[in-house]
């Protein structure tokens, strides 16, 4: 293959907003209710039911738009997108086509290749559809309208990305911005953040875009990366064989690592949009925009800079700590109690991350109180417990949110600094390990490490390591 | 009638609207749609330069509700309209995408 190809990618990202109620009715958006328990005539499309817009949806959409450098469309409105599908009870989706609430923004991403701005074409508000579950037993489908009418924003990027790495950096950045704003929890696996990938390839140097396909059903960063690689390869193969890429919607099958054309909706991609007659337009004043702008919390980039300056953390620490809002909140709350930023950072970056990985958990699921981590740090600092015991206690804090002071007391984990007792134990260790003693006398410095280890073992890790070292050197 | 609607257009619109029309209904629909387009042509004769497009018939904006849950469990009422029901859900013919 002699020709060089470039991948051109644009994303459509759907984000479920964190409102308490649906976009056009007072039904709860809470996750996990029994089927159809959060429904009413509005969100099930009963004739004559009238939608009324949830103000919080507009505020969240504006907040995301301002944080992604968009301009706000001060006179905006909704439109109807018409299509038939069993998850859509009205036979139309209320969305925005002509006057989306946010336009012409962009965010900066950082990859190994450096910094780059990805343009945001628009952000619009719309409603989610219901959920279809396939019933194997009766060979039918079951429809649950609890998600029908849950507010979404769709963030449409410009075709500015060129690799899976850039796509993931862009999604991570969007996720951070939106989570910090509190506008959504942005969980890909649970579907509160969904990305459709528009991809085309063209020969390097070409000015025009190739024919693009749209890929759906991508529910993890890894699936997105694999889908991009797979679709790029598929399109290049077609072109190399002298065939054409067909513009279509494809569904990514992450198990088979291949995308398939979707059969259902595409024979009627003519949505016949028209202005939504049941909703009046929205007029957004300068004052309203200013209010939303003022209420904007500290965002990721700002926080990262502040951690370096205020807490004197290395940028590496600051980057990891701010990569999840939950982690950043925990960090700040713990530091506020014990004022040991670097220590707190180490516990969160090393042990916390290790345990999260081990339990296959997300930082959002961390449930211990900052006060317990702060107490643990102080227990180590005033040498009530040593480092080994501290890790053990931290596991309990991580799992059960135990109070470390009480736990150390109850389990008798305090450092043993009783000199007489330690002398006794060290003497016994020396007696039991004549070979190591000989090695030590023959100049093998490492042997002392083994003897320290044996002493720690004999004290269940509770001995004061400084004292053990001192006593060993004295007795040898 | 200046606008003539072809058979292809009527067939396409029927697919989009999920309607099966008889030959008679098709002829009727063709003539109805033709006269609607004639009326649009008539409107297009007007000079609308400098006129803001109308987005709504009422001069009203910003009708909102607060983000407060007002509805409880309505599933019985919702499902009362279901032609078929299973496990608290609407049962429909198998749909896959
Ligand atoms: Zn409802």
Image (cartoon, rainbow, N blue to C red):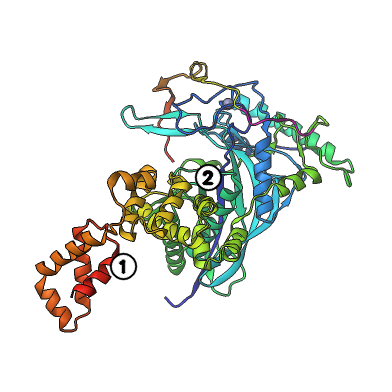
| x and y percentages locating residue A269 in the rendered image | 57, 43
- Give the left or right position of residue A192, taking residue A383 as reference: right
- Give the left or right position of residue A428, taking residue A361 as reference: left
Please say if A206 is above or below A421: below
Magenta residues span B61-68
| x and y percentages locating residue A428 in the rendered image | 13, 64
Looking at the rendered image, the disc whose residue lies closer to the viewer, 2 or 1, is 1
Q: To which chain does the residue with label 2 belong?
A: A
Q: To which chain does the residue with label 1 belong?
A: A
Q: Residue at 78% x, 37% y: name it.
A: B55
Prevalent SS, magenta region? loop
Q: Residues within 10 Å of mark 2 (few under 14, many from 20)?
A: many
Query: How far is the residue under mark 2 from the one under mark 1?
Result: 46 Å
- Secondary structure beneath disc 1? helix
Q: Residues within 10 Å of mark 1 (few under 14, many from 20)?
A: few
- Secondary structure beneath disc 2? loop
Residue denoted by label 1: A466
Q: Earlier in the sequence, mark 2 or mark 1?
A: 2
Q: Residue at 56% x, 62% y: name it.
A: A311
User: Which numbered circle lies on residue A185?
Assistant: 2
The image quadrant that residue A444 belongs to is bottom left
Does residue A460 belong to the magenta stretch? no
């Amino acid at each position: 293959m002699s020709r060089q190809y470039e991948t051109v990618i644009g994303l459509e990202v759907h984000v479920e907003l964190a409102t308490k109620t649906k976009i056009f009715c007072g039904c709860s958006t809470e996750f996990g209710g029994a089927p159809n328990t959060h429904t009413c005539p509005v969100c099930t499309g009963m004739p004559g039911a009238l939608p009324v817009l949830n103000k919080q949806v507009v505020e969240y959409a504006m907040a995301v738009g301002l944080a992604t450098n968009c301009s706000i469309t001060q006179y905006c409105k909704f439109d109807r997108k018409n299509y038939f599908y069993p998850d859509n009870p009205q036979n139309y989706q209320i969305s925005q086509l002509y006057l989306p609430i946010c336009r012409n923004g962009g965010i900066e991403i950082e990859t190994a290749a450096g910094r780059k701005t990805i343009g945001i074409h628009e952000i619009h508000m719309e409603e989610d559809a219901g959920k279809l579950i396939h019933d194997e037993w009766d060979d039918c489908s079951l429809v649950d309208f609890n998600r029908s009418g849950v507010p979404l924003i769709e963030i449409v990027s410009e075709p500015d990305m060129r690799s899976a790495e850039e796509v993931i950096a862009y999604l991570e950045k969007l996720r951070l911005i939106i989570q910090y704003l509190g506008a959504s929890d942005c969980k890909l696996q649970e579907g509160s953040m969904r990305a459709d990938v528009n991809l085309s390839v063209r020969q390097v140097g070409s000015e025009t875009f190739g024919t693009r396909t749209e890929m759906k059903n991508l529910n993890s960063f890894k699936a997105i990366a694999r889908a991009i690689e797979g679709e790029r390869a598929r399109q290049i193969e077609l072109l190399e064989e002298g065939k054409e890429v067909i513009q279509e919607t494809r569904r990514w099958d992450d198990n088979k690592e291949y995308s398939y054309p979707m059969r259902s909706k595409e024979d009627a991609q003519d949505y016949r949009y028209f202005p939504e007659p049941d909703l009046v337009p929205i007029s957004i004043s300068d004052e309203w925009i200013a209010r939303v702008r003022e209420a904007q919390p500290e965002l990721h980039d700002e926080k990262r800079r502040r951690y370096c300056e205020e807490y004197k953390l290395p940028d590496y620490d600051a980057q990891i700590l701010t990569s999840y809002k939950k982690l950043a909140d925990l960090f700040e709350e713990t530091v506020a109690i014990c004022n040991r930023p670097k220590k707190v950072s180490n516990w969160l970056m090393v042990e916390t991350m290790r345990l999260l990985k081990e339990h296959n958990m997300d930082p959002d699921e961390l449930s211990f109180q900052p006060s317990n981590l702060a107490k643990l740090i102080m227990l180590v600092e005033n040498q009530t417990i040593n480092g080994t015991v501290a890790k053990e206690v931290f596991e309990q804090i991580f799992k059960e949110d135990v109070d470390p002071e009480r736990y150390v007391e109850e389990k008798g984990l305090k450092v043993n600094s009783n000199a007489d007792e330690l002398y006794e134990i060290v003497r016994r260790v020396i007696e039991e390990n004549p070979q190591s003693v000989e090695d030590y006398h023959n100049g093998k410095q490492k042997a002392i490490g083994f003897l320290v280890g044996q002493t720690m073992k004999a004290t269940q890790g509770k001995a004061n390591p400084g004292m053990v070292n001192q006593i060993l050197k004295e007795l040898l | 009638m200046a606008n003539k609607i072809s058979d292809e257009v009527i067939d396409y619109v029927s697919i989009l609207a999920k309607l099966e029309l008889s030959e008679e209904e098709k002829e009727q629909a063709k003539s109805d749609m033709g006269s609607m387009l004639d009326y649009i042509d008539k409107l297009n004769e007007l000079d609308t330069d400098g006129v803001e497009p109308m987005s709504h018939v009422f001069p009203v904006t910003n009708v909102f509700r607060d983000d407060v849950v007002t509805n409880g469990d309505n599933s019985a009422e919702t499902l009362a309209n279901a032609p078929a029901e299973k496990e608290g859900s609407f049962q429909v013919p198998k749909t896959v995408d």
